[in-house]
Image (spheres, rainbow, N blue to C red):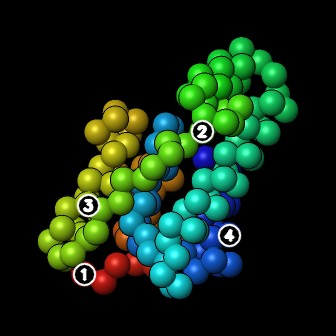
């Protein structure tokens, strides 16, 4: 998860990614983002490429049964492509957030992910979520660009 956080921080600081909300789960990520330079697809492509390389490198550095199993799943996913491993899905599922009501709905959905997955009882207990930023808690893993509501 730290690889993803570090990459998001970098994209926010260096590539103009504005992060309105996020949750990083064990097997997927939800983001509400936009790009200052209207190049969101380029930023997301670079983010996915960089994090995939880092994740694969980390898994290969420590050979154990768990890491070998994960690498085998990434290899299976890539079996229909030209890559050795596929960490991310090829396409994203972007949804344009047009109304304040829809934004609030998606923000709640994102922040409720860890609760709905049974990982925590309260949204603020999941460290890898912007819910902690919105609640004004001190221990956040990264800064965001809060959505005005």
Task: State the residue in front, 22 or 17.
Answer: 17
Q: How far apart are marks 2 and 1 (CA)?
A: 34 Å
Quarter of image, res 149: bottom left
Q: Are marks 4 and 3 in contact (CB under 8 Å)?
A: no
Tag nearer the camera, 2 or 4? 2
* Residue occupying the point 80% across, 30% down: 60
Label 4: how many Cα within 10 Å (few below 14, some 14–19, many 20+): some
Q: State the image coordinates of residue 33 (x, y, percent, origin top left).
A: 43, 70
Q: Which callout, 4 or 1, points to the residue nearer the camera?
A: 4
- Residue 140's place in the image compared with 111, above or below, is below
What residue is shown with label 2?
A: 87
Q: Is residue 126 above or below residue 68?
A: below
Q: Horizontally, is 97 left or right of 101 in the view?
A: right
Classify 53 as above or below 9: above
Q: Name the residue under label 1.
A: 149
What is the C-alpha distance between the residues marked 4 and 1?
A: 26 Å
Mark 2 closeness class: few <14, some 14–19, many ≥20 residues within 10 Å: some
Q: Could you tell me how far apart the alpha carbons at marks 2 and 4 are, in whole angstroms?
A: 20 Å
Q: Distance between the residues labelled 1 and 3?
A: 13 Å
> Which numbered marker is on residue 106?
3
Observer-nearest residue: 47 or 115?
A: 47
Which residue corresponds to the image point at 81% horizontal and 22% vertical from the top-left? 63
Residue 10 tag number = 4
Residue at 40% in and 36% down: 119
The residue carrying pointer 1 sits among few (fewer than 14), some (14 to 19) or many (20 or more) residues within 10 Å by Cα, namely: few
Determine contact: label 4, label 1, CB under 8 Å.
Answer: no
Q: Is residue 25 visible?
A: no
Q: Disc 2 versus disc 3: distance between alpha carbons?
A: 25 Å
Q: Regarding mark 1 in the picture, which secondary structure is present there?
A: loop
Image x and y of residue 138, in percent: 52, 69
Give residue 66's quadrant in the image.
Answer: top right
Of 29 and 92, nearer the camera is 92
């Amino acid at each position: 998860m730290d690889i993803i956080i570090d990459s998001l921080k970098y994209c926010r600081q260096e590539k103009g990614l504005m992060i309105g909300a996020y949750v990083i789960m064990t097997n997927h990520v939800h983001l509400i983002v936009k790009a200052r330079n209207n190049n969101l697809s380029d930023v997301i492509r670079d983010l996915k490429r960089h994090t995939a390389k880092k994740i694969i490198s980390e898994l290969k550095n420590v050979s154990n049964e768990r890491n070998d199993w994960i690498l085998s799943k990434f290899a299976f996913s890539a079996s229909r492509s030209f890559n050795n491993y596929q960490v991310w899905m090829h396409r994203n599922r972007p949804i344009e957030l047009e109304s304040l009501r829809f934004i609030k709905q998606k923000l709640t959905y994102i922040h409720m992910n860890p609760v709905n997955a049974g990982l925590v009882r309260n949204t603020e207990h999941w460290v890898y979520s912007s819910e902690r930023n919105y609640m004004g808690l001190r221990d956040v893993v990264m800064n965001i660009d809060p959505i005005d509501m």
